[in-house]
Amino acid sequence: MTISGCFKTDQHLVNIPHRWGACPNARFLLGEQSLLLLLIRHRAKILAFAGISVSALLGTPVQAEKLPAGHFWLELSGTGPFWHASRGENYFIGATETKPEYSAAFFGEAGYRSNGSPWSITMRGGYGVSARLETAFNTSGTISGISAAFVGTADVKENLSFLDFEAGRDVIFGSSGTKLRLHAGLRYARFRSKETGSGDQTYNGSTWAVTTLVKRKFSGVGPRIGLGSRTPLAESLSLRLDASGALLFGRRKYHATIIYPGFGLFTDDRNRETVVPVLSAHAALAWTPPSVPGMTVSLGYSVEAYFGITETWHVSGYGKSDRIIHGPKLSVRFEF
């Protein structure tokens, strides 16, 4: 199917057939403030998801006499993660590379439990960045039955941040000392990607030199539930396991600018409502130095997957792509 688009030259607008979609003056102008409307629209799904979480928390037996006294805690973590996409051709514009050259992530957590209570509240945040420079790409396909290709290089930078608020309840099992924590709350996440590139575009036997700027965004908020466990293995050593899931209601945005030197400028905007499922898992060995009461050092591995978080483009059509972030994680926890 051929869709009319627009190229803007110095003299006038020229209508030409292409498959990219809207003209520059037809872009959507919806902002992140529409998240509140999305939450209202999807309130039934959110309430059902949260209702399961609350029922699980309230229906759990607790041995209160074995719970720790009231205290605050602070945990700081860092990791050198590996970022992957669900499809190699969708990580960058038509690129086959699926890993960035540079990446890092940092996390912080603060919580409080009152005296003798099985309940606790926690706030947690994280920020991760990745980059790949001079990435070669080569994508080809058909546009309205005509062969097309796009070859060049691009610099790509991405960042992902999140903020959690949760309430949890502890359960302790018998003499083994294994402690479970069921929790439920909200997560807000924000994803940004920027690509700048240059190359050659071929269409119907003609080739043009082009420069590109592509921005991808997502912002969303939604319910989150999870389960964590702490199992003593030896004196001062324990096994830490955590798993959680979330549903983020938000908007996925895509904006591309392609410049044809001496010919014209093309822009493309896409803006759509979406629901992004998130799954997280973490396993670590935790050591509490006997000489430093209240401090715990953990070393393990974490995985976090955001499904369908970003809009993608390649010659034969649009799509969506996941971001799967995993890697070794070092944490230091202080209890007061």
Image (tube, grey):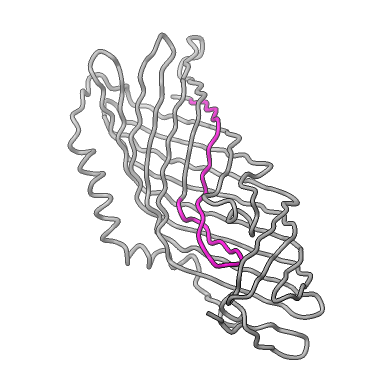
- Asked where in the image residue 72 lies, by quadrant, the reply is top left
In the image, residue 300 lies at what x, y percent?
Answer: 50, 26
In this rendered view, identify the residue nearer to me: 327 or 161. Answer: 327
Q: Is residue 314 above or below residue 122?
A: below
Q: Is residue 169 above or below residue 211?
A: above
What are the residue bounds of the magenta stretch?
A: 307-333
Looking at this rendering, what residue extends furthest in the right direction? 262
At x 38% / y 33%, what residue is drawn? Answer: 112
Q: Is residue 149 magenta?
A: no
In the image, residue 265 lies at what x, y percent?
Answer: 72, 77
In this rendered view, identify the residue nearer to me: 272 or 169. Answer: 272
Q: Is residue 241 above or below residue 277?
A: above
In this rendered view, identify the residue nearer to me: 147 or 274. Answer: 147
In the image, residue 146 lies at what x, y percent?
Answer: 63, 75
In the image, residue 144 lies at what x, y percent?
Answer: 58, 77
Left or right: where 87 falls relative to 294: right
Looking at this rendering, what residue extends furthest in the bottom direction? 12
Left or right: where 302 falls relative to 183: right
Q: How many marks?
A: 0
